[in-house]
Image (tube, rainbow, N blue to C red):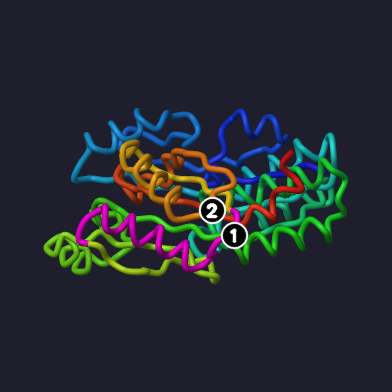
Amino acid sequence: MKIVTDCAADMSAEELEQLGVTAAPLFINFPEGEINATEISADDFYNRLEAMRPAIPTTAQPSAGIFAELYRKLAEKDKDIFSIHISSGLSGTLNSAHDGGGQASPDAKVNYWDTLTLSGGERFQVMAAALAIKAGWAMDAVQERLKKIRENTEVIYTLDTLEYLARGGRIGRVKALAGALLNLKPVIRVDSDGKYSTVGNGRTLTKSMGMIADSVREKYGNKPLWVTVLHGRFTEKADALAAEFKEKLNIAKLEVVRISPVLGVHTGPGIVGAGIVPMELMSDLVK
């Protein structure tokens, strides 16, 4: 079985190759043209993003045609495909995948999975699926595990500024202006419906990062956790959040990952947060 995901899963090229996963491209539309988000480095992207202020690029999901072509190519080696994608509550990527699978039928037989999350949370599900399938698990067992991971994963972050969310139309300009005037640093999480909600607002990034750690501690208690700290171009804050987690959580595995440029369009460089999953849901797969 072949696995397809998208670049919102924040998986490195090395991870994708090791796990045998194919990532459908997401696109960034700059004034000078469209680029595949995987073909620009994070630093080059943020340099371009900041240089074009107050304008902002737009993003685009893969078309149904791109998915159809991808599925047909993979089906030459294995007709069975499992397509795992960013939350349908945040992107139309899954709809494009469904349409593409319809175009590729009967050459390809595609199963679809809505992760109801993104970034580090999506990555956990893709990794688990790939490892379980490599281990010979049946599809029912794979989906049952993904369901448990989906229900028990937290993706939570804070932003240095609401400017990029406002310019991209993700929140209202009035709300963004009010947040800027009050110097608020919102703490945002992905809810069980796959959409964003606000946990709270800190007056400083330090306070908001403390709120993130406290919220995760309240949810998981002393369970051993796999924690992926996520950031745009915020290394110092990512290190500080990792230290906060070490102090307050039972860490089984900790790593620091930079988010995909396609997600950075809507957050700017000043994003720091984490994807968290109970280690018990991954430990039998990750050797």
Q: Residue furthest left?
A: 181
Q: CA distance from mark 1 to mark 2?
A: 6 Å
Residue on which disc 1 sits: 223
Q: Nearer the viewer, residue 188 or 246?
A: 246
> The disc labelled 1 sits on which kind of residue?
Lys
Q: Nearer the viewer, residue 65 or 76?
A: 76
Q: Which residues are magenta?
A: 203-224
Residue 268 position within the rendered picture, expressed as x and y whole percent measured from the top left:
30, 45
Identify the residue shown where x is 87% and y is 54%. Answer: 138
Q: Can you tell which quarter of the image residue 75 is in? A: top right
Q: Is residue 152 shown above or below 93?
A: below
Identify the residue shown where x is 43% and y is 58%. Answer: 156
Q: Can you tell which quarter of the image residue 196 is in? A: bottom left
Q: Main SS type for the magenta part?
A: helix
Q: Secondary structure at mark 1?
A: loop
> The disc labelled 2 sits on which kind of residue?
Asn
Q: Secondary structure at mark 2?
A: strand
Residue 221 position within the rendered picture, expressed as x and y whole percent measured from the top left:
53, 65
Residue on which disc 2 sits: 250
- Indicate whether residue 205 is drawn in magenta: yes
